[in-house]
Image: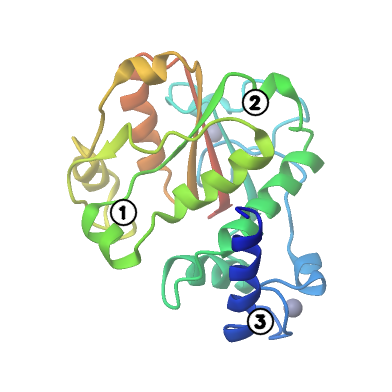
Amino acid sequence: MDKIIPKTEEFLLDLFFPKFCLGCRKEGTYLCDDCRALLDIAEFDYCLCNTKPLRLPPGSKSGKCQRCRDKKLSGLYSALPYKEKHLTKKLIYQFKYQPYLKDLAKTLANILIEHFIISGKNTDEIWDNGILVPIPLEKTKLKIRGYNQSEELAKELSKVLRIPVISDNLIKIKNTKPQMELSKEERERNLEGAFTVKKPFDFAQGKKIFLVDDVYTTGSTMEQCAKILKENGVKQVCGVCIAREG
Ligand SMILES: [Zn+2]
Ligand SMILES: [Zn+2]
């Protein structure tokens, strides 16, 4: 019975709210195969830096260029470029804003999984002992949207990667301004004290944390979260995002 209900629900939802491709309006899915094929899913990994990031040699373990060696994040896994492709922006926008297509989490997680496969990250060595941790959302934003998009994404990734999601331990305790509008110093001040870990022991057990976010822009939010996690005993923190700027 349990299995039948969600299927019926999905069927009814499709009947009343048919899905349309966000690229070409074709009915059936949010992203048809033709439009998906146009997306430039990354075959390689790049450094964290947001201007001209270094392309890393396949199979490299450090995941960073020399300039970034002091950063708390160990690396960043990103599937798509954010700037050039209009469709990528559209997909992410509709995932976060009206009409709030929460379901897009599946489509977007699939894109990330494809990136993991074609870039050679489908190995146990990478994901073993890992925990997926979504970048937390402010309470006010959560209220408006009804869900944390990064958490939805993490849940979908978790089904394929078979590693747990912990979304209530790294929390946001201060409202922040959008990072884009701020200078580097202002960004740091803006994020100071914004995040905290409720039960450090729960994370320190996991060894490796994959921070999940939709878009990587300046990288300062993810870096701040990595810093807090490391202060709380986490050994390694790596970022996972659908798309990145730069
Ligand atoms: Zn299409
Ligand atoms: Zn770098």
Asked if marks 2 and 1 touch (Cβ < 8 Å), the reply is: no
Circle number at residue 98: none
Given residues 61 and 168, the one toward you in this image is: 168
Looking at the rendering, which quadrant does residue 127 occupy? top right
Disc 3 marks which amino acid?
A: Phe
Crowdedness near tag 3: few (<14), some (14–19) or many (≥20) residues, C-alpha within 10 Å: some
Given residues 40 and 71, the one toward you in this image is: 40
Residue 21: give x, y in percent of width and height.
68, 78
| Residue in the image at 62% along x and 21% along y | 62
Q: Is residue 173 above or below residue 16?
A: above
- In the displayed structure, does residue 95 sit left or right of residue 192? right
Which of pointers 2 and 1 indicates the residue nearer the eye?
Answer: 2
What colouring does the structure picture have?
A: rainbow
Q: Is residue 9 above or below residue 109?
A: below
Between the residue at mark 1 and the residue at mark 3, the CA separation in whole angstroms equals 32 Å
Circle number at residue 127: 2
Which of pointers 1 and 3 indicates the residue nearer the eye?
Answer: 3
Image quarter hosting the C terminus: bottom right
Dot 2 lies on which element? helix
Residue that carries the numbered disc 1 in the rendered image: 179
Asked if marks 2 and 3 touch (Cβ < 8 Å), the reply is: no
Dot 3 lies on which element? loop
Quick one: label 1 or label 3, which is nearer the N terminus? 3
Residue that carries the numbered disc 3 in the rendered image: 20
| Residue in the image at 64% along x and 37% along y | 54
Quick one: label 2 or label 1, which is nearer the N terminus? 2
Disc 1 marks which amino acid?
A: Gln
- In the displayed structure, does residue 78 sit left or right of residue 123? left
Dot 1 lies on which element? helix
The quarter of the image that holds ligand 1 is bottom right
